[in-house]
Amino acid sequence: MTEPTATKHLADLIATWLQPLGYDLVHLEAQTHRERVLRLFIDFPENSEAAKSGKRIGVEDCVKVSRALDEPLENNPEVNRVFHEAAYELEVSSPGLERPLRKARDYERFQGTEARLHVFRPLTAEELENPEYCARNPKQKNFLGVLMGLKNDKVRLGVPSGTAEQGKSRRPNKKSSNTGRKPGSELSTNSVEEIFIPLPLISKANLEPRFELDSTPSSSASIGSEERENEL
């Protein structure tokens, strides 16, 4: 079994363990070179009371998951395949402001919020379903816009009309609120046109963070595989 396949199987397994605890696995990273780290990003399920109330993952949630996974991960064959039976460190974190979008339902869940999408290659006019936009931006691979849900296995994205190179970075607006991660004024005050991005062609997608001067960093907990017994 190849390492990516083993990591996928491990992610599926951990996701099933998290469900009865009241959490979703947003993303799993396995760092296997030099420092060995199993990094989990967790969130509340979309339809949970915690998510509906706007509650965010805190340190106590990360610690709870770290301790709950200690026994199931101990000598687990999927873990051993990924780390070749070597010691590793388990890190559990909140998704943070730049929450990754990994599942199709994420694009529905975060409708109305601003996101940054990267694709493997420039898209055709037919794929974008917007020939005029494609003509203005023929080589674009990075997109910044407002999520508008899904349609026919494509992400609907609202982008400012007539503006080229939507994927360019811009300075965070420190006066903007990060509550709810609502779109920035750059998109809400301009006319918006719609483009479509096929899900299979998306290489990476994240919510675009909105910052405040007193913004709180993401929460995390870390327990090494050789230290968990002492921690507990």
Image (tube, rainbow, N blue to C red):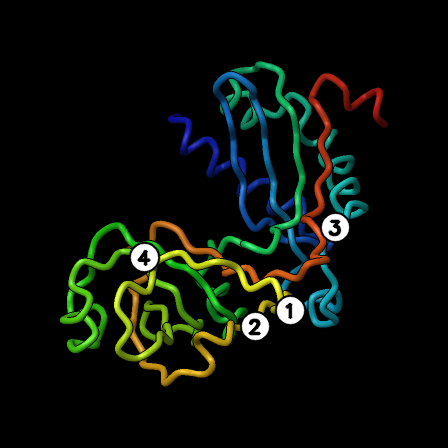
Label 3 to label 2: alpha-carbon separation: 29 Å
* Amino acid at dot 1: Ser
| Circle nearer the viewer, 1 or 3 | 1
Closer to us: 112 or 29? 112
The answer to the question of whether label 1 and label 2 lie on touching residues, with beta carbons closer than 8 A, is: yes
Quadrant for the N terminus in the image: top left
Label 3 to label 4: alpha-carbon separation: 36 Å
| N-terminal-most mark, 2 or 4 | 4
| Circle nearer the viewer, 3 or 4 | 4
Q: Which residue matches tag 3?
A: 21
Closer to us: 33 or 161? 161
Label 2 to label 4: alpha-carbon separation: 20 Å
Task: Please give the label number shown on residue 142.
Answer: 4
Label 1 to label 2: alpha-carbon separation: 8 Å
* Amino acid at dot 3: Leu
* Amino acid at dot 2: Lys
Closer to us: 195 or 89? 195
Up/down of 92 relative to 218, above or below: above
Task: Please give the label number shown on residue 182.
Answer: 2
Label 4 to label 1: alpha-carbon separation: 24 Å
| N-terminal-most mark, 1 or 3 | 3
| Circle nearer the viewer, 1 or 2 | 1
Task: Please give the label number shown on residue 177.
Answer: 1
